[in-house]
Image: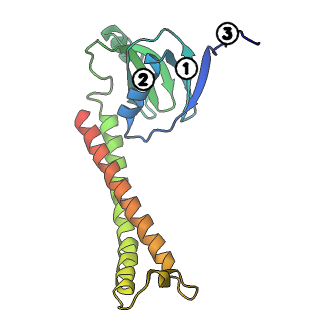
């Protein structure tokens, strides 16, 4: 349509993946989408968010991990009476929203299942980090001896007759993964303080 007004869709899907300990980021992202005029109405699978067009408004979202626990109508009614709007349960999470200026307690506050899940994720990441240390240490020590050999040139690291570049790649990947794991453990620790 030449010169006509471009029609905006009334609904859209967004693919976004959040780690289990980053519910705060998920809540913040949903609030930003609502401020742009897109309100959440469904979550399909683990990472497909469905929005419908609405008036831009400041909303506060709450994501509550409940695992395999059944929905108890009395709990939902109590949360709705407090001021939360129940958006639905999608997988192992329940989604709520309320006006941003409402000072409501988070639906997950005081729930032991949230704390158990975060502790389990923290211990799993700690185990992975500890298992990653020996391989990374070995690669770093090998490179240290290779580099500290005296007349070393960086081009020798990539020579055809040596596989030393594999140790360099292993060391870099090991250090990056250890940094990521430590960062994730710190995020879980911060989330546990909120619960």
Using a 10 Å C-alpha cutoff, classify the residue at mark 1 as few (fewer than 14 neighbours), some (14 to 19) or many (20 or more).
many
Task: Name the residue beneath numbered marker 3.
Answer: 5
How far apart are the two marked residues, 2 and 1, measured between alpha carbons? Answer: 12 Å
- Distance, label 3 to label 1, CA atoms, is 22 Å
Q: Estimate the x, y position of residue 145 in percent, counting from the top left.
A: 35, 86
| Residue at the spot of label 1 | 51
Q: Is residue 150 left or right of residue 45?
A: left
Label 2: few (<14), some or many (≥20) within 10 Å? some
Dot 1: element: strand
Q: Residue at x 58, y 33 (%)?
A: 45
Do the residues under discs 3 and 2 have CB atoms within 8 angstroms?
no
2 or 1: mark nearer the eye? 2
Q: Which mark is residue 170?
A: none
- Given the current orientation, which residue lies at the most extreme right position? 1
**Which x, y percent locates residue 91?**
51, 31
Task: Check contact, mark 2 vs mark 1: CB within 8 A.
Answer: no
């Amino acid at each position: 349509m030449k010169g006509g007004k471009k029609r905006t869709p009334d609904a859209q899907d967004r693919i976004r993946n959040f780690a289990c300990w980053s519910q705060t980021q998920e809540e913040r992202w949903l609030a930003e989408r609502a401020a742009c005029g897109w309100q959440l109405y469904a979550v399909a699978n683990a990472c497909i968010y469905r929005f419908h067009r609405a008036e831009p408004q400041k909303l506060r979202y709450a994501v509550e991990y409940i695992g395999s626990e059944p929905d108890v109508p009395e709990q939902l009614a109590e949360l709705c009476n407090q001021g939360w709007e129940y958006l639905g349960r999608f997988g192992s999470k329940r989604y709520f929203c309320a006006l941003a200026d409402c000072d409501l307690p988070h639906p997950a506050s005081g729930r032991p299942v949230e704390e158990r899940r975060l502790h389990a994720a923290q211990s799993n990441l700690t185990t992975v980090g500890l298992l990653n240390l020996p391989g990374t240490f070995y690669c770093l020590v090998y490179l240290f001896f290779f580099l500290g050999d005296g007349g070393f040139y960086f081009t020798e690291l990539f020579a055809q007759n040596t596989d030393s570049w594999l140790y360099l790649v292993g060391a870099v990947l090991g250090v990056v993964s250890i940094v990521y794991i430590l960062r994730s453990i710190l995020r879980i620790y911060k989330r546990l303080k909120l619960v």
